[in-house]
Image (cartoon, helix red, strand yellow):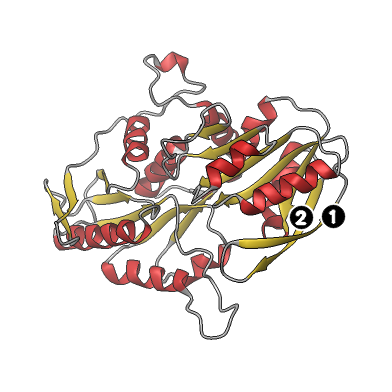
Amino acid sequence: MYADEFSIYAGNANRPLAEDICRYLKTRMGDVEVFQFANENIFVRVLENVREQDVFLVQPTCRPVNQSIMELLIMIDAFKRASAGRITAVMPFYSYGRSDKKDQPRVPITARLVADMLTVAGADRVLTMDLHQGQIQGFFSIPVDELTAINILSRYILAKDLDDMVVVSELGFAKKARNFAEILGAPLAIVEKRRVGNEDKTELMNIIGEVDGKNAVIIDDEIDTAGSLVEAVTALVANGAREIYSLATHGVFSGPALQRIMESPITEVIVTDTIPLPATADGSRITVLSVAPLFGEAIRRIHRGESVGALFSSEVQLVEEMTFWDAHAEDEADQPYPVPVEG
């Protein structure tokens, strides 16, 4: 049985998110060294006692992806050898999620490989958000808690009080998009497309549904190169859509993504802070919502043995209110809801 306290540590992938999680929980971040030697070998050293503690390691596997994965694996091993009571890998973004099946001859299932590496390294459970496909949970032999940003994103778009909305999604995200559309009370339109080869190129096929004269809200799990997004926007404009909003949990923004977005007629792009926003991003077109309170609340509940699923059922209102949480508000009275205090 681990000690009656928990500790939060972070690698280098997204320290600001880890710091905001600690602000929400009113706790300090633990001390750990994580750096690269000149030969690119990664070194980790835990700088305080963690024996029998409940440890949470915050590390999305974002750019640089392979370095972030290795940092997390080595951190897990370091804490395991430091006799931590339980180790939870907090992965707001799970890389290689697209490689979740054999869709071509002689290709790997890398999402399963990453799951195996985390388990072998010594992780006792995983906390993540909006996996590319839900079946990735089944690749693990340890417990996985998958959070979702759908309620936070929907709360933000509802606050805009847009009239005559339509939710737009590709086929692969249609199930979650349908739930999103129900929350907004809007109809659903589907972008039918086909991916060409392995070079992040798609061929737009058709838009199924009525978008003429409507405010379109495109929803997806991530925005990578924004190629598919811009093609969908072009098709929506051609079919008479008015304002176009793009919502996604993970703003990967690879390669020419930001330039494509700036040159497109998109009104606003809304993502969360699971991945740090590039410094070149235009703050007037891209809005970032914090998921720190959601992860903080999930960490608290995991530690106490309480329900995490309740956050998206009986307590969904709490999650929606987290949308406008300000990590840097000086006065707690300025927060949209009372921040819980560790009891």
Which residue in the structure is indicated by mark 2?
191
Q: Is residue 178 visible?
A: no
Name which residue type carries label 2. Val
Local packing at callout 1 (Cα closer than 10 Å; few below 14, some 14-19, many 20+) is some
Residue 153 position in % (x across, y down): 60, 37
- Quick one: SS at disc 1? strand
In the image, taking residue 119 as reference, residue 254 lies left or right, namely right
Residue 24 position in % (x across, y down): 37, 31
User: Residue reaching furthest bottom?
Assistant: 106
Relative to 44, say whether 334 is above or below.
above
- Of residues 216 and 158, the one nearer the viewer is 216
Name which residue type carries label 1. Ile
Query: Are the residues at dot 1 and dot 2 in contact (C-beta closer than 8 Å)?
Result: yes
Which residue in the structure is indicated by mark 1?
208
Residue 149 position in % (x across, y down): 56, 43
Q: Residue at x 76, y 55 (%)?
A: 191
Residue 302 position in % (x across, y down): 39, 49
